[in-house]
Amino acid sequence: MSDQRGYSGPEEALAAIAAQTAAAEPQAEHARRWSAEVATIQGVGVAEQGDVRAAVDIQGLLTGLSVKDTVTSRGGRATTAAIQQAIRGAQESVRQQAQASSERAWGPGSATSEAFRGEVEAATPLIEVEPLATDGRSAPRAEPSRPDNDGGTW
């Protein structure tokens, strides 16, 4: 091939294009395999000693949820907190798997790995786990009011 002044003719230009295409094909195949791997990532999170299980895909969508009766019998607030915990665990799992996959494919700290990490974090904003203020069966409330002891009715 010639230098930056151009090709000596169409044959040389076609040969250069063929060489560039052949060199790019392994990288394209690598990207296709990685894309297929990433599409299968699913995070699973558990709470309440496994009585609550949640699954989240790479896009941050809840794909599965299992809650045993022993958890729901404790009330809505306790059930909600356990579900939140399980979903957050699933989100964290997706993030970890995605990071590991991209680092294997493109190298730790690579621009591709960092960009992908940002995309996954945007797709899986970590759910806030609300702490229980009660036993889960009753509404949280302030201290009971006490009557004034200065006489009269209360």
Image (cartoon, grey):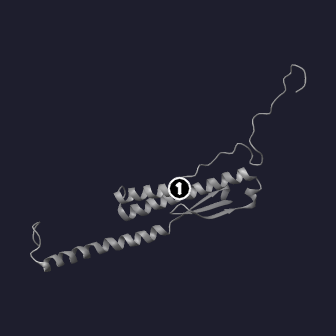
Q: Which of the 4 image quarters holds residue 142? A: top right
Residue 129 falls left or right of residue 104? right
Q: Quadrant of the C terminus?
A: top right
Residue placed under numbered mark 1 in the picture: 92
Left or right, 92 with respect to 83, comes to: left
Image quarter of the N terminus: bottom left
Q: Position of residue 115 (x, y in %)?
A: 39, 57
Q: Residue at x 39, y 60 (%)?
A: 103
Question: Who's the residue at 16% across and 76% down the image?
Answer: 13
Q: Where residue 70 sits: x, y (%)?
A: 75, 58
As drawn, the residue found furthest toward the top would be 150
In percent of the image, x 39 and y 63: which residue is there? 104
Q: Is residue 36 above or below residue 106?
A: below
Task: Pinpoint residue 55: horizontal percent, then vertical percent.
Answer: 59, 63
Between 12 and 99, the one nearer to me in the picture = 12
Q: Residues within 10 Å of mark 1 (few under 14, many from 20)?
A: many
Please state if 122 lies on the left or on the right of 150 as rendered: left
User: The residue under label 1 is which amino acid type?
Assistant: Glu
Vertical placement of residue 140 versus 106, above or below:
above
